Image: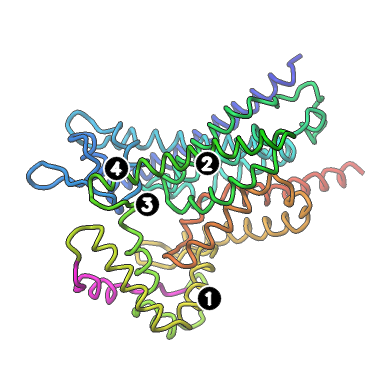
């Protein structure tokens, strides 16, 4: 007879193998998509691997330092560059499959610890087959890494910073002596948590808002001693400040400016707040979401190319910020409306209909995401007391942070990818309860 721990490892192995198969098949079928480099991550990675400089390779073979993109993802990719100086697509595919599997396994374990084994299986299944996460895993972009890191932060919070008491470890009848939760080492847990938060910020600067919301909340969880809690918050905060500070100092040294995030923020703000987009919002007709006509940015691109450029990428980014601020100041009512539109599009279940996106894809993704969002809302509403507990705060804070940032800066549905695991857990609560009720009815 297997012990409870053996059963747990067996279940985890099933989750891991299933996730590898699903992610692996999708990445293999869309392997050619990895050749695209829409955000220049490949270029920076290859430059870093060949020259040791985080920058863009010029025709002379020398790299010009840049802060156009956050450093973590290109740094990881640089380890996958071949001796010939080319990024290995096979290695990238394996990395994304590994990150996707990690996301699925962590989601399963969060739900298992916080809810029950039944909820864990449903949550892991929803994450494993989520079309948005599957699609993003076939692109050289940060969503796959960002989602994995966000889940790791939440998992560390649930498993180490605020673990369940041993007599409440399982809700599904598993004996208490099978609980694998330990008190841990508070200071070491704080160090790891600070490192994980730092990694998320260096992957996507949006996560800095999330970190600011999580660090003070650490005072409310963990050891009963207030002094220990305070020191733990200080340790984690210092690590985050040090990580962001080192990136800032690097940029100050290489670019002559203390850039803490990227030199891409101005463009992103301008993309979300320009006259062409505002005009589109004024004239956009109310059509069904699956037939929504996307904004044509060609006019914006023409205006952006004709702008007065700065002397370097930092000053050029400042020019973009000023252009966006001018648009906002000149049309404040449209800014308010556009903020609501951007927040809505962040959580919009249906992707926009484009020339390279078939109606079948739009309907499949849209209806799947609609079902998940509805179930998640029902799950949170039905179990609202559970979602007021400390273990829910990283998930709630992530929703607030993503919505707040992307209601001002440019947004689309893929940018909510890091929140999909929490949606899956909320939806799984309803799905697991429904199947349990059906089983009880059949037993009568």
- Whether residue 307 appears in magenta in the rendering, the answer is yes
Q: Residue at x 23, y 38 (%)?
A: 48
Viewport quadrant of the C terminus? top right
Alpha carbon distance from label 2 to label 1: 45 Å
Viewport quadrant of the N terminus? top right
Q: Residues within 10 Å of mark 4 (few under 14, many from 20)?
A: some
Q: Which residue position is annotated with label 1?
A: 288
Looking at the image, tell me whether mark 4 or mark 2 is earlier in sequence order: 2
Q: Position of residue 119 (x, y in %)?
A: 71, 41
Q: Residue 158 sits in which quadrant?
A: top right
Q: Residue 122 sits in which quadrant?
A: top right
**Kind of element beneath mark 1:** loop
Q: Which residues are magenta?
A: 292-309
Q: For the residues carrying marks 3 and 1, which lies nearer the camera in this image?
A: 3
Is 156 located above or below residue 245 in the figure?
Answer: above
**Kind of element beneath mark 2:** helix
Residue that sits furthest to the bottom in the current view: 283
Residue 112 visible, this angle: no
**Kind of element beneath mark 3:** loop
Residue 250 disc label: 4
- Whether residue 176 appears in magenta in the rendering, the answer is no
Display colour scheme? rainbow
Asked if labels 1 and 4 touch by Cβ distance under 8 angstroms, the answer is: no
Is 174 located above or below residue 438 in the figure?
Answer: above
Alpha carbon distance from label 3 to label 4: 11 Å
Q: Which residue position is annotated with label 2?
A: 237
Query: Which of these two is toward me, 278 or 359?
Result: 278
Residue 406 disc label: none
Task: Describe residue 11's horizontal placement relative to residue 398 as left or right.
Answer: right
Residue 438 visible, this angle: yes
Q: For the residues carrying marks 3 and 4, which lies nearer the camera in this image?
A: 4
């Amino acid at each position: 007879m297997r012990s409870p721990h053996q059963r747990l490892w067996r279940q985890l192995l099933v989750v891991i193998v299933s996730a590898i198969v699903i992610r692996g098949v999708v990445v293999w079928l869309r392997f050619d998509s990895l050749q695209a480099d829409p955000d220049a991550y490949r270029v920076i990675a290859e430059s870093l691997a060949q020259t040791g400089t985080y920058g863009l390779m010029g025709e002379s073979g020398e790299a010009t330092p840049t802060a156009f993109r956050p450093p973590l993802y290109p740094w990881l990719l640089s380890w996958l560059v071949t001796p010939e100086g080319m990024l290995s697509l096979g290695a990238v595919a394996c990395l994304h499959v590994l990150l996707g599997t990690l996301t699925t396994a962590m989601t399963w374990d969060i739900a298992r610890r916080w809810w029950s084994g039944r909820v864990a299986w449903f949550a892991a299944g929803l994450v494993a087959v989520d079309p948005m996460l599957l699609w993003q895993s076939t692109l050289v972009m940060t969503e796959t890494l960002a989602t994995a890191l966000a889940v790791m932060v939440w998992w560390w919070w649930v498993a180490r910073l605020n673990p369940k008491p041993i007599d409440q470890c399982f809700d599904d009848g598993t004996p208490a002596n099978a609980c694998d939760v330990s008190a841990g080492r508070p200071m070491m847990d704080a160090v790891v948590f600070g490192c994980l938060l730092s990694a998320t910020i260096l992957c996507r600067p949006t996560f800095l808002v999330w970190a600011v919301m999580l660090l003070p909340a650490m005072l409310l969880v963990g050891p009963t001693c207030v002094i220990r809690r305070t020191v733990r918050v200080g340790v984690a905060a210092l690590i985050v400040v040090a990580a962001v500070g080192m990136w800032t100092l690097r940029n100050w040294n290489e670019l002559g400016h203390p850039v803490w995030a990227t030199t891409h923020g101005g463009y992103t703000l301008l993309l979300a707040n320009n006259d062409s987009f505002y005009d589109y919002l004024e004239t956009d007709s109310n059509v069904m979401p699956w037939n929504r006509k996307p904004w044509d940015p060609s006019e914006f691109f023409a205006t952006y190319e004709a702008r007065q450029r700065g002397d370097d990428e930092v000053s050029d980014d400042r020019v973009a910020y000023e252009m966006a601020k001018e648009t906002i100041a000149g049309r404040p009512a449209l800014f308010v409306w556009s903020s609501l539109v951007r927040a809505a599009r962040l959580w919009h279940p249906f992707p926009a209909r484009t020339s390279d996106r078939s109606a079948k894809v739009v309907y499949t993704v849209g209806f799947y995401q609609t079902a998940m969002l509805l179930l998640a809302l029902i799950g949170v509403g039905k179990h609202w007391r559970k979602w007021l507990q400390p273990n829910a705060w990283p998930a709630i804070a992530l929703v607030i942070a993503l919505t707040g940032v992307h209601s001002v800066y440019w947004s689309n549905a893929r940018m909510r990818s890091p929140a999909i695991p929490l949606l899956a857990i909320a939806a799984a609560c309803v799905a697991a309860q429904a199947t349990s009720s059906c089983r009880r009815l059949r037993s009568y």
